[in-house]
Image: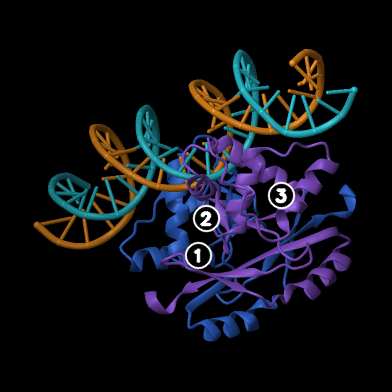
Chain colours: A blue, B purple, C cyan, D orange
Amino acid sequence: MSKECNSHAHGPELSDLTGHLRTQDHKITAPRQAILNVLRNEKHPLTTRQILDALPGGFCNLATVYRSIHLLQRLGLVQRYDFGDGAARFELTRGGKDHHHHHLICTKCALVIEVQQCIALDLEQQIATGNGFTKVSHKLEFFGVCPDCQ
Amino acid sequence: MSKECNSHAHGPELSDLTGHLRTQDHKITAPRQAILNVLRNEKHPLTTRQILDALPGGFCNLATVYRSIHLLQRLGLVQRYDFGDGAARFELTRGGKDHHHHHLICTKCALVIEVQQCIALDLEQQIATGNGFTKVSHKLEFFGVCPDCQ
DNA sequence: TCTCTGATTGCAAATGATTTGCATTTAGCC
DNA sequence: GGCTAAATGCAAATCATTTGCAATCAGAGA
C-alpha cells in the first residue's frame, strides 16, 4: 500500500519517534509512523477507534493501534486521558514531558477545550510527602455544559 | 432468603434512601437496601463486582447492582470515581452533596487514601465563567507508589 | 544485495465491564 | 387480597481492550 504517512512530515515528533524507538530496540514501522501522524494532526485526545478511522482505509488493525499506542505511551511520546466514558483517549505529548494540561469537556456534545492552568502540582507534591508516596501524578478533568448546549 | 440488610442500620443514609426513593416514584426493594448497606460499611469506592461479592451469597444479580447503583447515583446518594483501570467505582455521598473529596491511589497495590483538600473548586469556577460553561464539575485523582511498595 | 532473526502485524478468539430485552416477580396503592 | 407499573433475573448483546498464533517485515550482519 502507498505510504502517505511520513512524506509530509512536519514538526519534531517524527524524528523523536525514530530516535526513541531506535535507542530501545524497537522498529520503525509503517503503522507506527501513520498513527503518530494522525496524532500530530489532532489537537485533542483521540480514542483508539478514532485513530483507526483517521488512518487511510484498512491501513492497519485495531490491535496494532492498541499495541502501538501503548508503546508510544511507554516511551513518553503519547499521553493518556480519561473522560469518564469507557474509552481511553490519547494525545501527543507536546513540548516535553513537563508540559501537562487538562481538559474541559461538554457532557452534552463532547466538545473539548484545553485547560492550561494546573493547580494540582503543588498539592501533588504536598500529598506525596504527606503520605510517603513516590512517583506521584494526577488526573484532572473538568466537565460541564458548553454555551451551545445550554 | 434472610434479610440482614437493614436490621442493624446505622447512620442517616438509609432514611435518605427511603425518602429520596419515595418522592420519585421508586420502590424500596431488598437489593437496593442491601447494596446501600454494603456501601455504608465501606470507606473507599467499590466496583460493581466488589459490591456484588460483598452481598450475602446470591443476594441479587450483577445487572441489578448496576441498575441500582445508577439509580442511587441519579438521586445523588452515590458518587462515581474512576481510578484509571477499566472499572468504575462507587462510594456513598456523605455529609451532603457539597462534601467532595479525592483519592490517592497506589499504582502497585491499589491502596486508597482519601484526600480531603480540594484546590480545584476555585479553578472550576474560573474555568466555567471563562468558557461560558454551566454545571461545571471536575474529577481529580492522584496516583503514586505507597511506602510499602517502594 | 541477500539472509537471518527477533520484532511486529493481522486475524480471530478471549476477556472484562457494562447494557439490554424479555418474561417473571414484587412493592405499594386501592 | 388484588392490581399495575416498577424492579428483578437471566441470558444474550455490546463495547473496549487484550492475547495467542501463524505469517510478515525491519534492520543488523554476511
Measure the C-alpha gap from mark 2 to mark 3. Answer: 39 Å
Contact between marks 2 and 3 (CB within 8 A): the answer is: no
Measure the C-alpha gap from mark 1 to mark 3. Answer: 37 Å
Q: Which residue is mark 2?
A: A36
Please report, as a chain letter, where disc 2 is located: A
First in residue order: circle 1 vs circle 2: 2
Mark 1 or 2, which is nearer the eye? 1
Task: Pick whichever, B119 or D18, lies toward us.
Answer: B119
Give the residue at x 52% y 46%.
B55
Q: Residues within 10 Å of mark 1 (few under 14, many from 20)?
A: many
Mark 2 or 3, which is nearer the eye? 3
Q: How many marks?
A: 3
Please report, as a chain letter, where disc 3 is located: B
Expressed as whole percent of the image width and height from the top left, the position of residue C15 reads 39, 40
Contact between marks 1 and 2 (CB within 8 A): the answer is: yes
User: For the residue marked with disc 3, what is the amino acid?
Assistant: Gln
Whether D25 is drawn above or below D13: the answer is: below
Q: Quadrant of the C terminus of chain B?
A: bottom left
Q: Secondary structure at mark 1?
A: loop
Mark 1 or 3, which is nearer the eye? 3
Give the residue at x 66% y 77%.
A120
Tell me if I can see residue B27 in this picture: yes
Expressed as whole percent of the image width and height from the top left, the position of residue B112 reads 52, 68
**Toward which corner of the image does residue B102 lie, by quadrant?**
bottom right
**Toward which corner of the image does residue B78 lie, by quadrant?**
bottom right
Q: Specify whether disc 1 shares its chain with disc 3.
A: no
Q: Which residue is mark 3?
A: B73
User: For the residue marked with disc 1, what is the amino acid?
Assistant: Leu
Task: Pick whichever, A121 or B99, lies toward us.
Answer: B99
Give the residue at x 87% y 48%.
A149
Tell me if I can see residue B89 in this picture: no
